[in-house]
Amino acid sequence: MYQEKIEEIKAAIAAADANNPEQLEAYRMEFISKKSVVGQLFGMMGQIPNEEKRAFGQLVNGVKQAAEEKFQELIEKVNSGSKASKSQEIDLTLPPDNEPLGSIHPLTATRQRIIEIFERIGFNLSEGPEIEDDWHNFTALNFPENHPAREMQDTFFIEKNPDIALRTHTSSVQVRVMENQKPPIRTLSPGRVYRNEAISARAHCIFHQVEGLYVDENVGFADLKNTLYHFAKEMFGKETKVRFRPSYFPFTEPSAEIDISCLICGGKGCNVCKGTGWVEIGGSGMVDPNVLENCGIDSKKYTGFAFGMGIERITMLKYQIKDLRLFTENDVRFLRQFSPLMT
Ligand SMILES: [Zn+2]
């Protein structure tokens, strides 16, 4: 009979488990202590016939040993478990997990750099609305009635008669500044502009410009050139050359496109500059006297220059970005490459 009971106890020991000190103590009470089932087996010795005592003793000792081995095993298990749970406690002395930081958008970095360069030579910052009326976006800037920019296919109109449109350039801010301030004026107006263009690698319906305006007595074309020479060297490097190409804008006279020597080939000619050695960064010119008068500034006494540059264009040249659409696609693989610009 006792063999069966011993087998039962052995099976119970093998199946026993403990995950905490309380369960460990329950095991000890059940299988190790004097009052345990194993302890009780020893008490049975008196009832065992003499010829079986030796075999019974061996069996009971075997059970006792199995119970003790299992107990050691469970002690180790419970102890290592409590160590693991300790390691999950908060250690206030550890350095924090670094939250991944984003990076400055390349257009923001370029805009900031342009502002820094011009602020150091006395330009302040000015802003205007992105939704403009006809006067500030076109008429005050000397745009003739039949200018193509006034057409629906080139400009996003919100209302017609009177015309309200998304501004097509930051030049509208010139008008707002000159209407509200008296010369000397030296101001820089960065901002978002809108044109009704198909989106491609080289064009977008939304982009950014930065407009510069300097109005005072005796401001001449030499001041314009010197200011932009200074800018180009600061922005693109000391070796950068600047070239002015005659052009036409309604609001400046004379007008000139601003080219810089190609940053890729240094002027030798490559596919970025289409073999010419020059790349365009913006337009410029002397403020047309009509524009000054439209804004209430005496064009006999004051002259001024203005320039406008595309922030996307400058960023693409500076960082050799080939597709304009990358700026607005929010692909972190693209944006992450500019994380060094944060410093
Ligand atoms: Zn080139």
Image: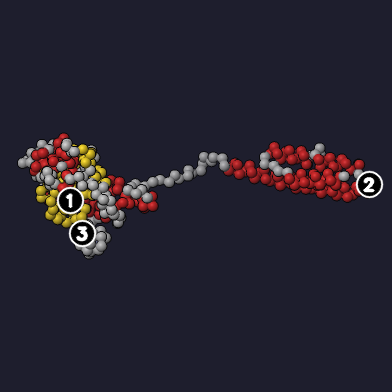
Q: Looking at the image, what colour scheme do you see? A: secondary structure
What percent of the width, then of the height, locates residue 267? 22, 62
Among numbered discs 2 and 3, the one appearing first in the sequence? 2
**Rendered image: mark on residue 278:** 3
Q: Does mark 2 have its CB less than 8 Å from ligand 1?
A: no
Residue at 30% from the left image edge and 56% from the top image edge: 322
Number of other residues with Cα within 10 Å of mark 3, as a class: few under 14, some 14 to 19, many 20 or more: many
Q: Which residue is mark 2?
A: 50
Task: Using the image as rendered, state which of residue 195 and residue 26 is in the foreground.
Answer: 195
> What amino acid type is highlighted by mark number 2?
Asn
What percent of the width, then of the height, locates residue 268? 22, 64
- Residue 142 lies in quadrant: top left
Q: Is residue 48 left or right of residue 304?
A: right
Q: Which residue is mark 1?
A: 283
> What amino acid type is highlighted by mark number 3?
Trp
Number of other residues with Cα within 10 Å of mark 1, as a class: few under 14, some 14 to 19, many 20 or more: many
Task: Using the image as rendered, state which of residue 266 and residue 128 is in the foreground.
Answer: 128
Tell me the SS state at disc 3. Answer: strand
Q: Is residue 343 left or right of residue 44?
A: left
